């Protein structure tokens, strides 16, 4: 690289946010040229101060340092080598080094770039934490949970599934039901999987009699739902199966299993779109507190809380770039967002809950004056549960940050409810909300998790 070209790149790179350097390996080890960004990344205010450092002394991890120089000696180049550098204040910084060795026998140089990848590493650690959380959740549910790809091959299972087959985890992954069950039974499972894949419709609470690999019989209840990628395309299925053999109270266990299945699906949605991770729980908390003021019994409280936790479940099939789009949505995009209500209703409408869960979710965007969607219901056409959920959803949404806008705050949310009281929103429920805020000294009365 010509000297004037390298100087030009040094100057230009400060605007790119990367560190650029030329380092002498022989006869003396020292930085010959660096840009200001490299010094700034490591906490040095002066390039001259930074240039006195030795490259090998920047490595926090001695093993990383040895691997770096061994690879460089062998290949004469290194690409995106991730390691931690020591900052001036003693702290650490995750960096990626891409460099090439040039020169002759007597004079050797190292030229390359150093990038700050600390944000990238933080995201990786966050994703790893979320994966561990998800696996922990799955492993602590007393049901067999399994994920399959579009070829119906098993790609992930929980601990209960492994224990049920009495096999090792690695002996299950990549296999199909035909490897574990009789041909007739596996064919029925395959037909159910393909139905979900081809129609996008779930199979909820199907009671089956199965023959286990050891020849014994079991009675199970199974729910299967489609899995979507970021673009809303179906990429596989998730199943959850509970062994009902030892249970006498089938209906109660069926309800518990269904709630578990829908809760797991809700967790999958939250991991797909992090901005929903707190929203659903907060809406559920708000709705439950309102319902407790109304003196509802525990069964009805369970219904309104579950409605809050699941009300945005239909968004699992909507592309993320539309859900989190900054700025105004097009008419087509807005209609697609509105479809999440009907999608969620379709998932749970055929499930026999002892409360009006599906209808509550179906109506939660309706307004008393008929200005809501999807059916433009009015007044007595909207059930009380849906009126509570509507107010809870508005209150939480306006007081929380969204990727397309900042949080609007409690004051503006209360103003919206006050202005719409009696017209768009149930006035009695609005009064309860105002009293709850007042009792909490003008602050939110639900837990911002």
Image (cartoon, rainbow, N blue to C red):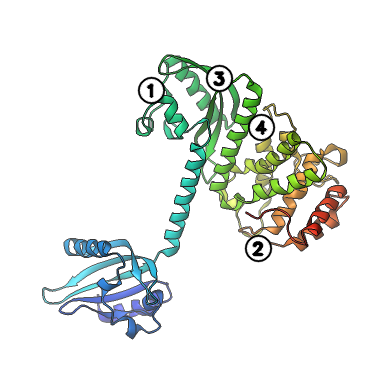
Q: Viewed as shown, does residue 413 lie left or right of 65?
A: right
Marks 2 and 3 close (CB-CB < 8 Å):
no
| Residue at image mark 1 | 179
Of the image marks 2 and 3, the number of the one nearer the N terminus: 3
Helix, strand or loop for disc 1: helix
In the foreground, 31 or 127 = 127
Q: Is residue 366 visible?
A: no
Q: Are marks 1 and 4 in contact (CB under 8 Å)?
A: no
Identify the residue under disc 3. 246
Q: Earlier in the sequence, mark 1 or mark 2?
A: 1
Q: Residue at x 40, y 83 (%)?
A: 45
Residue nearer the viewer, 190 or 223: 223
Quarter of the figure with the N terminus: bottom left
Mark on residue 348?
Answer: 4
Gap between marks 2 and 4, in whole Å? 33 Å
**Camera-nearest label, 3 or 4:** 3
Q: Residues within 10 Å of mark 4 (few under 14, many from 20)?
A: some
As drawn, the label of residue 406 is: 2
């Amino acid at each position: 690289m010509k000297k004037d070209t390298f100087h030009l790149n040094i100057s230009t790179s400060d605007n790119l946010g990367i560190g650029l350097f030329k380092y002498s390996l022989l006869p003396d080890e020292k930085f010959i040229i660096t840009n200001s960004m490299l010094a700034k990344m490591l906490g040095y205010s002066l390039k001259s101060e930074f240039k006195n450092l030795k490259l090998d002394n920047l490595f926090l991890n001695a093993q990383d340092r040895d691997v770096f120089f061994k690879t460089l000696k062998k290949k004469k180049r290194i690409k995106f080598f991730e390691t931690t550098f020591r900052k001036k204040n003693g702290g650490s910084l995750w960096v990626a080094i891409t460099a090439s060795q040039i020169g002759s026998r007597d004079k050797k140089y190292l030229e390359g770039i150093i990038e700050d990848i600390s944000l990238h590493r933080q995201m990786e650690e966050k994703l790893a934490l979320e994966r561990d959380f998800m696996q922990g959740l799955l492993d602590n549910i007393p049901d067999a949970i399994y994920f399959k790809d579009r070829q119906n091959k098993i790609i992930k299972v929980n601990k209960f599934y492994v224990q049920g087959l009495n096999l090792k985890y690695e002996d299950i992954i990549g296999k199909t039901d035909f490897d574990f069950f009789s041909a007739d039974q596996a064919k029925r499972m395959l037909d159910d999987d393909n139905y979900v894949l081809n129609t996008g419709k779930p199979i909820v609470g199907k009671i089956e009699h199965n023959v286990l690999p050891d020849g014994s019989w079991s009675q199970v209840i199974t729910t299967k739902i489609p899995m979507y990628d970021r673009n809303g395309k179906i990429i596989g299925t998730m199943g959850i199966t509970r062994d009902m053999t030892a249970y006498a109270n089938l209906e109660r266990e069926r309800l518990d299993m269904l709630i578990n299945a829908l809760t797991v699906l809700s967790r999958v949605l939250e991991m797909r779109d992090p901005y929903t991770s707190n929203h659903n729980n907060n809406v559920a908390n708000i709705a439950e507190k309102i319902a407790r003021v109304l003196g509802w019994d525990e069964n009805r409280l369970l219904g309104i809380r579950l409605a809050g936790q699941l009300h945005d479940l239909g968004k699992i099939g909507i592309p993320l770039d539309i859900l989190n789009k900054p700025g105004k949505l097009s008419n087509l995009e807005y209609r697609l967002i509105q479809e999440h209500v009907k999608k969620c209703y379709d998932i749970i409408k055929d499930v026999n809950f002892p409360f009006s869960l599906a209808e509550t979710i179906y109506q939660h965007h309706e307004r008393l004056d008929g200005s809501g969607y999807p059916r433009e219901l009015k007044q007595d056409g909207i059930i009380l549960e849906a009126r509570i959920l509507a107010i809870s959803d508005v209150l939480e949404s306006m007081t929380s940050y969204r990727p397309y806008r900042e949080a609007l705050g409690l004051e503006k949310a209360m103003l919206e409810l006050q202005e719409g009281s009696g017209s768009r929103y149930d006035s009695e429920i609005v009064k309860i909300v105002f009293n709850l805020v007042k009792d909490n000294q003008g602050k939110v009365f639900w837990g911002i998790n």
